[in-house]
Image: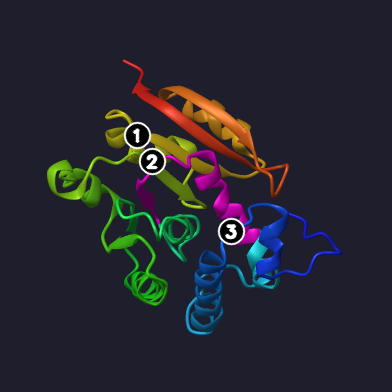
Amino acid sequence: MVQPETMRDGPETLDAYFPVSRETRDRLVIYVDLVRRWQKAQNLVSPSTLPHIWLRHVADSMQIHQLAPDIRLWIDFGAGAGFPGLVTAILLADEPSAMVHLVESNQRKAAFLRAVIRETDAAACIHADRIESVTDHWDEAKDGVIEGVSARALADLEALCGFARPFVARGARGFFHKGRDSRSEIVKASHTWNLDLVEHRSLIDPQSAILEIHRIDPFV
């Protein structure tokens, strides 16, 4: 991703891509401030990306909601610092029926995510456990019917499809951020999975993509 030389990285960066309300912007400012504060104690994001956090992380993450504005119930695997899941949850903060389930097994990162949710009223909850444990014990009657699955910088597409399949098989769509190796990951995953997939080129980085997946079936 390349930061335009004429653009100062800050909340105003969003205006060029995804304008938001004042309330949403205020929540995102709180979030970014917390990332910078907690970054001193734990490695939430790559230090080299901090000077461009609004473009490299916030705007990049917002693409998920732009591609699926109708989805209200999400699960985000390997939530980490909250990109994209917590950004989605902030964008949905004023939607009464919305919830983003953030799955993060690292307890320190889970504590950070809880702090952001508390300060921003984001529409999110934390599952501080392994992905497999969360998916294996998912109860639709209690936890809800997942409509969207997201992940960013977690694993290759083949592995992500394995994680997401239980939800996609019941009608959810997968949205996975991928870098310049997205095509090779698609080829590799296609050896294991029969995929119905749409590749959206990133608006933030033309060399990256968001893969939207509608079907994941194993080859038999």
Judge left or right: residue 11 versus residue 210.
right
Dot 2 lies on which element? strand
Q: Position of residue 77 (x, y in %)?
A: 38, 51
Dot 3 lies on which element? loop
Distance of label 2 from label 1 (alpha carbons):
5 Å
Distance of label 3 from label 2 (alpha carbons):
21 Å
Q: Position of residue 85 (x, y in %)?
A: 44, 55
Task: Point out the stretch of residues depicted in magenta.
Answer: 56-78
Judge left or right: residue 22 versus residue 161.
right
Dot 1 lies on which element? loop
Mark closer to the chain start, 2 or 1: 2
Q: Compared to 54, does 108 lie above or below? A: below
Q: Residue at x 66, y 42 (%)?
A: 202
> Picture quarter containing residue 36?
bottom right
User: Which mark identifies residue 172?
Assistant: 1
Magenta residue check for 184: no
Mark closer to the chain start, 3 or 1: 3
Nearest-to-viewer mark from 3 and 2: 3
Q: Compared to 50, does 78 lie above or below? A: above
Q: Residue at x 48, y 42 (%)?
A: 69
User: Which mark identifies residue 20?
Assistant: 3
Identify which residue, 66 or 2, lies in the foreground.
66
Residue pointed to by mark 2: 148
Distance of label 3 from label 1 (alpha carbons):
26 Å
Mark 1 residue type:
Ala
Q: Position of residue 58 (x, y in %)?
A: 58, 61
Badge 2 crowding class, 10 Å Cα cut-off, few under 14, some 14 to 19, many 20 or more, is many
Mark closer to the chain start, 3 or 2: 3
> Picture quarter containing residue 206?
top right
Residue lying farthest right? 6
CB under 8 Å between discs 2 and 1? yes
